[in-house]
Image: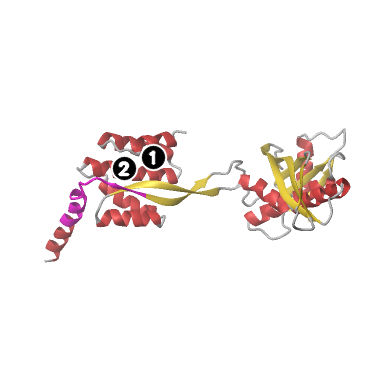
Amino acid sequence: MKTNHFKTFGLLSVALWTICSCAPGVQLIDVEKRLAPSHPVELSNKSIAVFSALDGKSDSTLISDLAQGIATSLEKRLSREDGSIFAFNVRLDSTTVMDDEFIKDLSVRSNSDLVFILSSVKLNDAGIYLNKVPSLDYHATYVQLPFNLLLDVFDGVTAVKQTSVSMKDTLVWEIVSRNQLKESVLNVKLKEAFSGAASDIGESVTINFFESWKKDSRALYYFLGQKWEESITAARDFNWEKASRIWLEAVGSSNKHISACAAYNLAVVCELQDRKDLALKWLDYAKKRYPLTLVEGYETFLKK
C-alpha cells in the first residue's frame, strides 16, 4: 500500500506541470541586489591608520576633522572598538616626496598595515541665498558649499598604492538668524558646518570600500498551481534555493512554455547572485524553448 501511495503522489507531481498550459502571469517582487565595492581593498584583519596631509595652505582643522570622520566610519563598518583606528597629522613641506620610503615610514610610525592619506581637501566658493521671511522676524540664509577631496590608500609594507578615492560633493544647509549675517560671521559658520558634517562625509567616503545593497524589483513568471505559488512565495522570502529547486524541475517539462518561463526565472536567480554569465545561458535556453516577451529586455539589461 505504501508503494502505491508514493506512485500516486509522483503522478500528481508531474501532473502539476502538465495541466498548467494556460498563459503565464507575471509577478513583480522586491529584491535587494548586492553591489560590489567601487574601490575594493582587503580591510579584514588589517591595522589601519588615517593621515591628514597638511601642506600649510589648507585649513588644518577641517582636514584633521575629516580624517577623524573617516577613521570613525571605518571603525563602525569593521565593527571595531572606538579609537582603534587612529587619525594622525603629517606635515608636508616643499621638500617632502611621497615615495615608497615615505609611505613605509608612516606605516612603521603608526604600526599599521594600511596607510590612508587624505592628501587633498578643497572648499570651493559657497553659493549664498538670502531670504527674509516677511511674516516672521528672522532671516534664513541658504548655503551651498561645494568641496572635493582625494584619499589615497597604500599597503604599508610594500608602499604599493591600493586605490584612490576622488570625491566631489556639495553640502547644503540653512542658517537662521535675527539679522542678516556679515561675511566674516558667515565664513566662520561655513567652517563650523563643514567640521560638523565630517562624520557624514567620512561615511560617504568609506562606503566605497564595502559592498552595499540596492533595493530593486524583478519580474518572475508563474502559472496556476501549488508549486508555482510555492516558488513565488519562496522568492518573496529570498529563499532562492527552494524557488530554484522548483524551477529546475519545471525547466525539464515537455511543455515548452512552462520550460521557458522556469528558465527565465532561473536567470533572475543567477543575476541576483552575481552570476551573469549563467543567467545569460538560461535566457538563451528560454529563447530556444518559447518566445517570452520579457526575455529580450532582460537580456539587454544584463549585457550593459
Q: Nearer the viewer, residue 112 or 183?
A: 183
Residue under the image location 63 percent in, 52 percent down? 45
Q: Which mark is residue 61?
A: none
Q: Is residue 177 left or right of residue 295?
A: right
Q: Which residue is mark 1?
A: 279
Residue under the image location 53 percent in, 49 percent down? 213
Graded by Cα atoms within 10 Å as few (under 14), some (14 to 19) or many (20 or more), the crowding at tag 1 reads many
Q: Which residue is mark 2?
A: 263
Residue 140 is a magenta residue: no
Q: Secondary structure at mark 2?
A: helix
Q: Is residue 29 left or right of residue 258?
A: right
The amino acid on which the numbered mark 2 sits, given as a three-letter code, is Ala
Graded by Cα atoms within 10 Å as few (under 14), some (14 to 19) or many (20 or more), the crowding at tag 2 reads many
Image coords of residue 204 (percent x, y): 66, 48
Residue lying farthest bottom?
1
Q: Is residue 60 left or right of residue 41?
A: right
Residue under the image location 68 percent in, 53 percent down? 73
The reply to whether callout 2 and callout 1 are in contact (CB within 8 Å) is: no
Q: Nearer the viewer, residue 178 or 109?
A: 178
Q: Is residue 47 visible?
A: no
Height in image: 97 above or below 130? above
Residue 20 is a magenta residue: yes
Image coords of residue 247 (percent x, y): 30, 48
Image coords of residue 10 (percent x, y): 18, 56
Q: Is residue 16 visible?
A: yes
**Among the 4 quarters of the image, the one containing residue 129:** top right
Q: Secondary structure at mark 1?
A: helix
Q: Which span of residues is magenta-colored?
A: 11-27
Residue lying farthest front?
135
Q: Nearer the viewer, residue 13 or 186?
A: 186
Q: CA distance from mark 2 to mark 1?
A: 9 Å
The tag earlier along the polypeptide, 2 or 1, is: 2
